[in-house]
Image (spheres, helix red, strand yellow):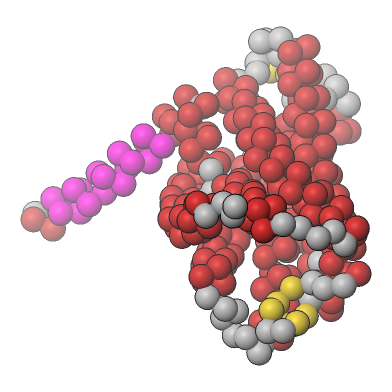
Amino acid sequence: MPLVFLPMMEAFIAHYGMVILFLFGNIGNVFIILLFYQYRKNAWSIYLSSGTIINIIYLTFDIPIFIYTYFHDEPIPYSLVFCKLRFYLSHVFGQMARYLFVLACFDRYILTSRNFHLRNFNRSINAKCSILLVIIFWCIICSHQLIFTTMNNQQCGQFGIYHIINSVYLFISFLIIPSVLMIIFGYLACHQMKQFGSKIRPLTNNQNGLIIITRRDRELLLMILTQIFIFCLTTIFYLAISLELLITISRNENKSIERIQIENFILILSTFFIYMNHAAAFYIYMIVSKGFRHDFKKLLKKCCKQPITASVIEQR
């Protein structure tokens, strides 16, 4: 018997869930940019702020198209250009955001490294160059989607052998590589900070200099480690369904209606979790970091005082 309740749950997630992610995700991302602006000379702030800007673009571009195409046909059924750009830009923005966060994890690792030359990479100019390289790299690497994405029976997507090749590519570049790199750099940063203890860390501009590890350094590492955990946890669903679909497509298996419904539901749910990775950073930071909450309160007080001050001046 078909699982009739699954399509209803899919529609609920695709409509209300995605709208919530779109609104609260973008609001939270804007707050992150405003809060990290005061640390704009630090490499970690440049990485996270740049990734947050990409997240805003990604959510703003991708979620409205996802919602529309779920409940309707393709926005422009006969537009091959839109079809190609939709998949290309969505993939480019998603990959940029993920690998900029990988760079933020790498930044936390090199900050605690005993290697002076490696620590010396922790500079704003190097961060900006790395971001530029990431942007150029993914704009080029993802260009295959511009070439091979096409229309078939008024449906936009990847078909034939390219669908299998693209699935393997996404499985590796989208899920495996960033997850492994985040875990490695996060573990090394945590391990090395524990070795330094609570008293010292190396200066980035002095090979023999030592300074106290700040609470902000520790909280920032905790923020990043928590985000790594959430990323790995939420990508498990997408990893599982992608692997299952890849195997069944390669075997050309016949599926029952119930199995198709279950696969579609898991795919919608896993897509929701993927979007959540681009929307939840602000709320993760608010939960785990006392310093971040303090900065947020200061920002709200500053925003509330400015209109009052302006009205007092006008009355005078």
Please indicate, yes or no, whether residue 210 appears anywhere in the rendered image: no
Asked if residue 246 is among those painted magenta in the image, a careful observer would answer no
Residue at horizontal 26 percent and vertical 45 percent from the top: 304
Task: Give the mark count.
Answer: 0
Q: Is residue 182 visible?
A: yes
Q: Does the magenta run of residues contain 306? A: yes
Horizontal and vertical percent position of residue 302:
32, 42
Q: Is residue 111 above or below residue 22?
A: above
Instruction: Give the residue drawn at x 78%, y 39%.
Output: 179
In the figure, 235 relative to 137: above or below? above
Q: Which residue corresponds to the image point at 37% horizontal and 35% vertical from the top-left?
A: 298
Q: Is residue 280 left or right of residue 47?
A: left
Instruction: Establish if 297 lies above or below 217.
Output: below
Q: Considering the whole magenta stretch, tell me its main secondary structure.
A: helix
Q: Looking at the image, which is closer to me, 154 or 181?
A: 154
Which picture quadrant has residue 310? bottom left
In the image, 94 versus 239, the foreground residue is 239
Q: Quadrant of the C terminus?
A: bottom left
**24 displayed left or right of 192:** left
Q: Position of residue 95 (x, y in %)?
A: 74, 56
- Residue 310 lies left or right of residue 136; in this view the side is left
Which sits in the foreground, 208 or 231?
A: 231
Quadrant of res 223: top right
Residue that lies at the very extreme toward the bottom in this rendered image = 78
For residue 134, which quarter of the picture?
bottom right
Q: Residue at x 18, y 48 (%)?
A: 308
Residue 20 point in image, percent of width and height: 44, 52
User: Farthest residue in the left direction?
Assistant: 315
Tell me the magenta residue range: 296-313
Q: Nearer the viewer, residue 264 or 52?
A: 264
